[in-house]
Amino acid sequence: MSTEHLKTIEKRLLWLSHWMIHHANHIRPKVDRIKVGGHQASSASMVSIMTALYFSALRPEDRVAVKPHASPIFHAIQYLMGNQTRENMENFRGFGGVQSYPSRTKDIDDVDFSTGSVGLGVAITSFASLVQDYINAKHWALDRPLGRMIALVGDAELDEGNVYEALQEGWKNDLRNCWWIIDYNRQSLDGIVREGLFDRVEKIFDAFGWDVVRVKYGALQRAAFEEPGGDNLRRWIDKCSNQDYAALTFMGGKVWRQRLMDDLGDQGDVTALIDRRSDAELAELMENLGGNCTETMRDVFASIDHDRPTCFLAYTIKGWGTPIAGHKDNHGGLMNKSQMAAWQEHMGVAEGQEWEPFATVADVEALRTFLGTVPFFSRGTRRYSDKPIDVPAIELQSDRDLSTQMAFGKVLDDLSKGDSKLAERIVTTSPDVTGTTNLGPWVNRRKLFARHALSDAFIEHRIPSTAKWEFTPDGQHIELGIAEMNLFLLLGAAGLSHTLFGERLIPIGTVYDPFVCRGLDALNYACYQDARFMIVGTPSGATLAPEGGAHQSIGTPLIGMSQDGLAAFEPAFADELAVIMEWAFDYLQRDGEGDPDERTWLRDETGGSVYLRLSTNSIEQPVKRADDDFRQGAIDGAYWLRKPGPNCEVVIAYQGVVAPEAIRAAGHLAGNRRDIGVLAVTSADRLNAGWTAAQRARARGNTLALSHAERLLADLPAHCQLITVIDGHPATLAWLGSVAGHRTIPMGVEHFGQTGTIGDLYRHFGIDAESIVDKVNGLTPGRHIQLVQD
């Protein structure tokens, strides 16, 4: 691999990335009077590493999560290879232009993993490697070469706790084919990284079975160490503090000389070693750390001939090769116009040639020929696809009291008994709550995944247990520890399997609903990448009443409503859940374009992920319902459980497990000859999204656009009043009054709960049938109805 070509590419990437940032901040007209930003220094420290990686080490099957602040280098690579446009580069961080951080869904170039929230792009690579092994172990998988899942890591990202949670999970699951390349520039946003920190971090990597490769010295430094006096220079470098090294780098060769002579002068050989170099050459030598040497990084990457997880600690200079190198303020700093003008002259880029990919290249044709042979780019963009899987009919009816959590387990158990392709592609996972979220029957039949079979001592010794859990390469459940961040990172990786590895999976994760909040950053990250998965939050609300407020979720319905890329449902009955799950398995696989569905004005053509908020509270099930209005309404977000008449005074709209309270209240209110409607809301999220979509459509000239929510409430008289009730935050349904202007009284939970029975807490929060009746009584003076206990 030509060192000359790599050095040429390195120089071009350094220039193009920095010019893109400079253009956005100092040349493109400013509209908002704020700095556009772009992290020039953080890009510069990565340029040698990324040059060696992309143009020497990578193969098409490899996948890379790029450090967020190295985004400009990544886009410069794609621009050099013809995968990004000049128009987008000129519009860096502008509307529709190159994104601030690599984005699978918003950038046009070949992004493997979106990054932005630090630490998550690092950790997802380990879970992607696990998913790759999972697929590779299955009989239905195509024979494809295994790739390395690679993260380019800022050293400050190692402060993120989720990184260490992922290390532990990787060790438990026999992680392999994973590289983390740490840009060890020892500078973060607020200061210099503490001395000796990586000595501690390295021990953590070693404890979890990673190989650690320190890349401290570049080729120039290693050659200097071989000269007489070189040992003393090496010892001085090793002892120099991070702050001193950064400050000396910023001040340049003359100051380097003075400091080295003060510390090492008059030692004969060392003085001669320093004197043989000009100030510029001395600065180049001292800044030639391993991570800033393309030749060194190329050779280090090539030396890895195994599949063990490997951490490369690459020492770098933040801002390497630029006038702001080493300055402690350079994280968010930018070269000013005069600095850029001087640097442009130094880089040899002629005025008017700033955007030319091959400006300053002596032999353009030779470089083009070389680029045409780079393995990583040999297949063009590397997005796979896999055709959708047929979804079998899912029917679930019960003549006894049943919870939605039990119904969920029953649906999966029924699927596990069959031989459908859908069942074959389902992979389940849970953060140490597999049994208590009703995945147990599925796991008993479909087993747990491990690359090598592991026996169950309880089975061997014939000890009775409901959990007959066997680890095998054929298993379809991935066991996780209790960290919810890892749950969502695994769901994100598995939910991209069709595009990363060409094999579609149907990932299903379960978690205690209160602890959805513990993984929110990773949930948002997974949705931002357009990963496709089903997350089941159960038990929810006040269901775990005896365990107190810490195990009772309040705001999760609002999370479901506000999270982009996630359709949230909270069914009350088993038959609703069956309808929703059958729809959801198809929805997870959609990837189309086109006009919104005019029934709801949702963009269901493009699909997304699904969140089910379920309960352990068993309730009486309705008689068999098979009408189209019920089935379609359950999917669209609501249907009339009790249709209102023309003179309806009150509608009780409920979502989820409080259904019996709403139904009982309606029954007693109706006994006083009020015209009462009962609206069963299965998804406030989809109702609300359809309503806002219809409003946008009307604003754009489509006056006939009408949402499902508007159709449901259209015939209610103006004086009709809405009572909304949910075992969750009342704002979830409070907006319903705005659809047609009806007065609305929202009921729900706004404060932490406490221990007690479900009945105790429902009365405490005022969401029981008696409280609903009291609310209705209070709406109309003189009209009071006493609720009689059944």
Image (tube, helix red, strand yellow):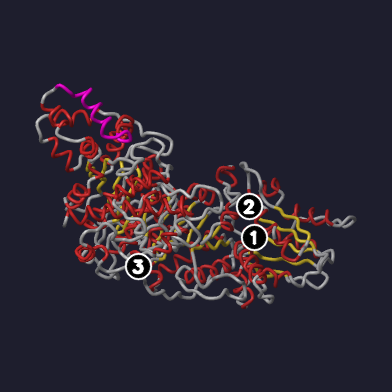
- Tell me the residue at 33%/61% (across/down): 356
Residue 221: % across, % down = 18, 38
Mark 2 or 3, nearer chain start = 3
Q: In this view, does 590 lie to the left or right of 70?
A: right
Closer to us: mark 1 or mark 3? 3
Residue 264, image x, y percentages: 19, 24
Per the image, the residue denoted by label 3 is 383
Q: Which of marks 2 and 3 is in front?
A: 3
Residue 253 included in the magenta stretch of the image: yes
Residue 149 in view of the camera = yes
In this rendering, would 224 be left or right of 473? left
Q: How crowded is mark 3: few (under 14 residues within 10 Å), some or many (20 or more)?
A: few
Please give the label number shown on residue 200.
Answer: none
Q: Is 366 situated above or below 264?
A: below
Residue identified by numbered label 2 = 728
Q: Which amino acid does label 2 sit on?
A: Gly
Stretch in magenta: 249-266
Residue most extreme to the right: 782
Disc nearer the start of the sequence (2/1) = 1
Q: What element carries label 2?
A: loop
Disc 1 + disc 3, Cβ < 8 Å? no
**Amino acid type indicated by mark 1:** Gln
Q: Considering depth in this image, is 145 or 445 the residue closer to the camera?
A: 145
Taking the image as drawn, is residue 175 in sight? no
